[in-house]
Amino acid sequence: MPITENICTLRAVTVEHPDPGPGGMYATSAGVGNPIDTAPNSPGYIDNQYWRFVHAENATWKIINVPYKNGTESVNNVGEPGFTNENARDHTLVTLTNTASAYKVSEDKDKDNVVVIRPANPPGGVGVDWVVGYSDEKKVEIVAIPVVEHPPPTPAWKVHWI
């Protein structure tokens, strides 16, 4: 399914292993000004795991947090808080701010609802592909994937449309 502005959840996967079975970790808001975490899709987290892709400039998207409360979309009076890596000191930690960054979102045509998210303005460097991934500390971050013959697994996101 092509990217739309519908509400979704984002499950952390890899391009090489896009459907790892039940469970998993999902992009989870910890509130404006805080790093975006990954957490299980379970009570206590689920209301903070809803996102919407919103068209931005030059074929890019903003990834906006959609607040929910008890399974119902809540009114958001603080603008459009979303993914940003612009304010991080090294531009790698993804935080939730009211000025969402633009990202390039590419769909894997061979894998249903799997996307790779790249910053529209990557940190830089030669010989690396910068993608939105996740750390061992359960934080969403910009990850450098070396452009080599046998690269490590590429972080991706399984989009579950609501």
Image: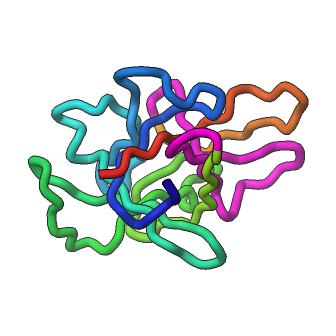
Location of residue 110 by image quarter: top right
Residue 73, percent from left and from top? 17, 60
Q: Is residue 7 left or right of residue 112?
A: left
Is 98 above or below relative to 67? below
Q: Is residue 25 left or right of residue 40?
A: right
What is the number of callouts on the image?
0
Residue displayed at 35% across by 23% down: 23
Residue displayed at 79% across by 54% down: 124
Residue 15, percent from left and from top? 63, 34
* Residue at the extreme left: 70
Asked whether 70 or 123 is in front, the reply is 70
> According to the image, what is the colour scheme of the structure?
rainbow
Residue 148, percent from left and from top? 88, 33
Residue displayed at 71% across by 47% down: 130
What's drawn in magenta, residue-wise?
110-138
Asked whether 147 or 71 is in front, the reply is 71
Asked whether 96 or 111 is in front, the reply is 111
Q: Is residue 143 magenta?
A: no
Is 48 above or below relative to 100? above
Residue displayed at 50% across by 60% down: 3
Residue 142, percent from left and from top? 61, 45
Q: Is residue 136 magenta?
A: yes
Is 70 above or below relative to 119? above
* Residue at the extreme bottom: 57
